[in-house]
Amino acid sequence: MAGLLRHASEITAITNQTVNSYKRLVPGFEAPVHISWARNNRSGLIRVPIPKKGNPMATRIEYRSPDPVCNPYLAFSVLLAAGMKGIEESYELPEEADANLFEMDDLALSKYGIAQLPQSLNDALVAMENSELVADALGEHIFEWFLRNKRSEWRAYKTHVSQFELDRYLKAL
């Protein structure tokens, strides 16, 4: 879990691959935005459900941010790489965040050292571009191809004027 938490920002472009993926990663909704873990708290990125009685081997974790449209092969590759890196390098697991993080302000979150996931595809791509972990997990060809395609998608999104914008702003001009 420590590896998943430490590398969460870098792998988010893979687990949340479209511009619309970030419309669900907003505070107050079901999808997590805070890089944290807890046993019974749905506001964190990783949830560790209580195992079934008498079966401690039934323990599992839920990495809660992946969007349903992500490529599962790429997503599992980076999730596994992040987890293994945490094990190999003995990353220290931060304290459990058992409070409702959606109700905390930025100052309180900062005090506890809880960061947020990237808030847009562009932010996620910036984090991914500098990630040796993601480059190694995907290989140079897929890493470069993915960045190139997603940068193109981001440019197209930035220049698109939606009906919402026309309805909201055209009357004001």
Image (tube, rainbow, N blue to C red):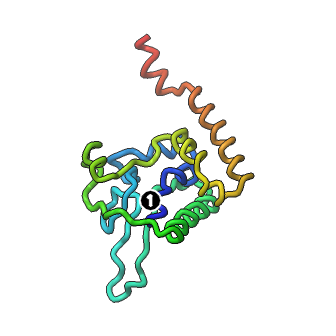
Indicate the quadrant where residue 168 lies. top left
- Above or below, 132 relative to 167: below
Total labels: the figure holds 1
Dot 1 falls on a residue whose secondary structure is: helix
Identify the image quadrant of the N terminus.
bottom left
Q: Position of residue 24 (x, y in %)?
A: 44, 46
Q: Residue furthest top?
A: 173
| Amino acid found under the numbered disc labelled 1 | Leu
Q: Position of residue 171 (x, y in %)?
A: 43, 14
Q: Which sits in the foreground, 148 or 168? A: 148
Q: Position of residue 83 (x, y in %)?
A: 52, 67
Q: Residue at x 38, y 49 (%)?
A: 115
- Say left or right for 10 vs 52: right
- Above or below, 116 relative to 76: above
Q: Position of residue 48 (x, y in %)?
A: 37, 70
- Above or below, 41 relative to 30: below
Q: Which sits in the foreground, 102 or 113? A: 113
Label 1 crowding class (10 Å Cα cut-off): few <14, some 14-19, many 20+? Answer: many
Q: Residue at x 70, y 47 (%)?
A: 144
Indicate the quadrant where residue 75 lies. bottom right
> Residue tagged by mark 1?
5
Q: Residue at x 31, y 64 (%)?
A: 96
- Say left or right for 9 vs 34: right
Q: Residue furthest right?
A: 141
- Above or below, 3 relative to 9: below
Q: Residue furthest bottom?
A: 54
Q: Which sits in the foreground, 70 or 37? A: 37
- Say left or right for 28 vs 71: left
Q: Which sits in the foreground, 140 or 169? A: 140
Q: Residue at x 54, y 45 (%)?
A: 127
Identify the image quadrant of the C terminus.
top left
